[in-house]
Amino acid sequence: MKTTEKLKGTVITGVVGEDVHIVGITVLGHALRKAGFNVVALGAQVPQEDFIGAAIETKADAILVSSLGGHAKELVQEFKDKCFEAGLGDIRLYIGGHLVIGETRWEDVEKSFKRLGFNRVYPPGVSMKQVVEDLESDLKGRN
């Protein structure tokens, strides 16, 4: 990206909780940077509070959470509530990866995470292009 081009927004990325599966969110970070986003990558084993602190510090537009261990629901309980409490009520929350263990219909997985306050929920293998396009659409006009 040329230095004269305006950034499309700032996003915080990381792998929540005790999960160490970093490859997917790292690749997504590269795709987002290439698309013109400022990406603050927190790495693996990131507590909710670190995502929120980084979002406050950088005035982020979105938080993108990855989890592949299958226990994401337990790891992101009250995440949206904590964002509200921290003054981030309008931040976009995305989550993706292998979010649950066992055979669960994707529609049910997606609904359960949306009830937890996530704006977008992605299955394993989602295309980077889809996430970038969704983020561009969701943030259009905010910056």
Image (cartoon, rainbow, N blue to C red):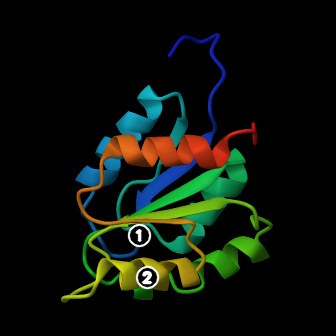
Compare marks 1 and 2 and give the one earlier in the sequence.
1
Q: Name which residue lies at 41% across and 70% down.
A: 16
Viewer-proximal residue, 20 or 113? 113
> How many badges with numbers are in the image?
2
* Quadrant the C terminus occupies: top right
User: In this picture, is 124 found above or below 18?
Assistant: above
- What is the three-letter code of the residue carrying label 2? Leu
User: In this picture, is 104 found above or below 36?
Assistant: below
Answer whether labels 1 and 2 touch (C-beta < 8 Å): yes
Q: Name which residue lies at 62% across and 32% down.
A: 8
Q: Looking at the picture, how far across and down is residue 17, in whole percent?
A: 39, 75
Q: Looking at the picture, how far across and down is residue 94, in whole percent?
A: 50, 62
Q: Secondary structure at mark 1?
A: loop
Could you tell whether 69 is left or right of 56 in the image? left
Kindly identify which numbered label has been placed on residue 75: 2
Viewer-proximal residue, 114 or 50? 114
Q: Quadrant of residue 128?
A: top left
Q: Secondary structure at mark 2?
A: helix
Which residue carries the number 1 mark? 16
Q: Name which residue lies at 61% across and 41% down.
A: 10
User: In this picture, is 74 found above or below 125?
Assistant: below
User: In this picture, is 44 found above or below 73?
Assistant: above
- What is the three-letter code of the residue carrying label 1? Val
Could you tell whether 126 is left or right of 108 in the image? left
Q: Quadrant of residue 92?
A: bottom right
